Image: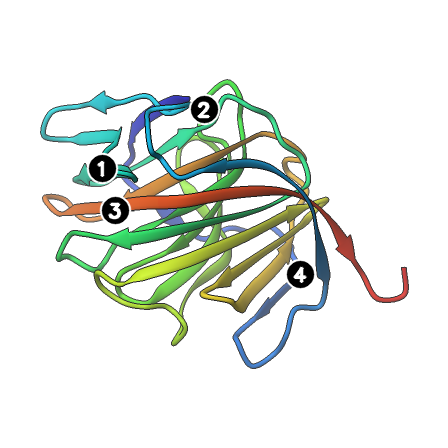
Amino acid sequence: MRIHLCLVFILLTASCQSIVERLGTGDGPGVGFTYLDLIYSDRFDGPGNWTSYDGGDKLKMAVDDGSYRIWLTNRQYVWAQLPYTFDDVVIEAEVRQLSDFNHNAYGIACRLDPANSGRGYYFLIGGDGYYSIRWSNGRSLDEIVSAKPSGVINRGSSMNRIKAICVGDYLALWLNGQFVAEARDSRADAGAVGLSAVMNYTGKTVEVVFDDLKIWRSALDEPGK
C-alpha cells in the first residue's frame, strides 16, 4: 500500500467539466451493473497490504483492531491505496466516524494514480449527512456530483455502507443499499482502489474506521445494448 499526506488550501472546489448527472433516491439509476467475480476482500485482521503511517499531530493511518483507521487534523485530504491496478469494478466498504465534528468527508476512491499523486475518483460522505463524487488532480477535490444532503446517510458515529461503481466512463454512488448519484467522466480508466478522509477546517479533526472492503470485477447493463 502507498499512503500520502497532502495539505491544500482549497479542498472542495467546483468543476467546469461537462457530465451527465442524476441525483436523489427518488429516481433509480439510468444504468445497471453486474457483479462478476470477487477479486479482492479485506476484513483488516492484519496489516496485509496496508502500511502504518504516523505523522504526529497531523495524521495517523493504520490497521487497528480489525479495521483501517484514519485520524486526520487540519485542512487536508489523504488517501491510502492498494498496490494493484483495477479497471471496471464495484467497490464496497463499511465506514464509521469516531470523531465528534461532523463537517468532514470520507469514503472510497477508484482509479487512483499508481504513482501515488492522488489523482483519481473519490466517493465521499460526511458525518453531516452530505455526499458527493469528486475528481482529484492531485491538488484539490473538484466536484463531479456536487455535495448534497441525503436521508439515507446515517449521520455522526453511525456505520454506513458505501458502494462505488467505476465501469467504463460510468461512476455511481450507492449508500446503505440505496442509489444516490451517477455521472459520466472519462479522465481515468484504470488505477488503484483506496480509502480517503477529508478535513476542510483548520484545527478540526476527523477520525474514521473502514472495514469489510470488497472489490468485484463488473460490467454495465445498459438498456438497449
In the image, residue 29 above or below residue 138: below
> Residue 167: percent from the left, percent from the top?
69, 46
Please report whichever mark, 4 or 3, sits nearer to the chain's N-terminal start. Answer: 4
Query: Along the horizontal axis of the image, is 140 left or right of 222?
Result: left
What's the residue type where badge 2 is placed?
Answer: Ser
Q: Position of residue 118 (x, y in %)?
A: 44, 30
Q: Nearer the viewer, residue 72 or 37?
A: 37
Q: Is residue 31 left or right of residue 90?
A: right
Mark 1 / mark 4, whichever is N-terminal: 4
x then y, percent, for residue 121: 52, 42
Asked if disc 1 and disc 3 are in contact, CB closer than 8 Å, the reply is no
> Does residue 53 sit above or below 70 in this rendering?
above
Mark 1: amino acid:
Asp
In the image as oriented, which residue stretches furthest toward the front? 45
Secondary structure at numbered mark 3: strand
**Within-10-Å neighbours for mark 4: few <14, some 14–19, many 20+:** few
Res 117 label: 2
Q: Which residue is mark 3?
A: 208
Decide: is 30 above or below 46: below
Q: Amino acid at mark 4?
A: Val
Per the rendering, the mark at residue 20 is 4
Residue 65: mark in rendering: 1
Looking at this view, is 62 or 186 the one in front?
Answer: 62
Asked whether, in this view, residue 29 is left or right of residue 143, the answer is right
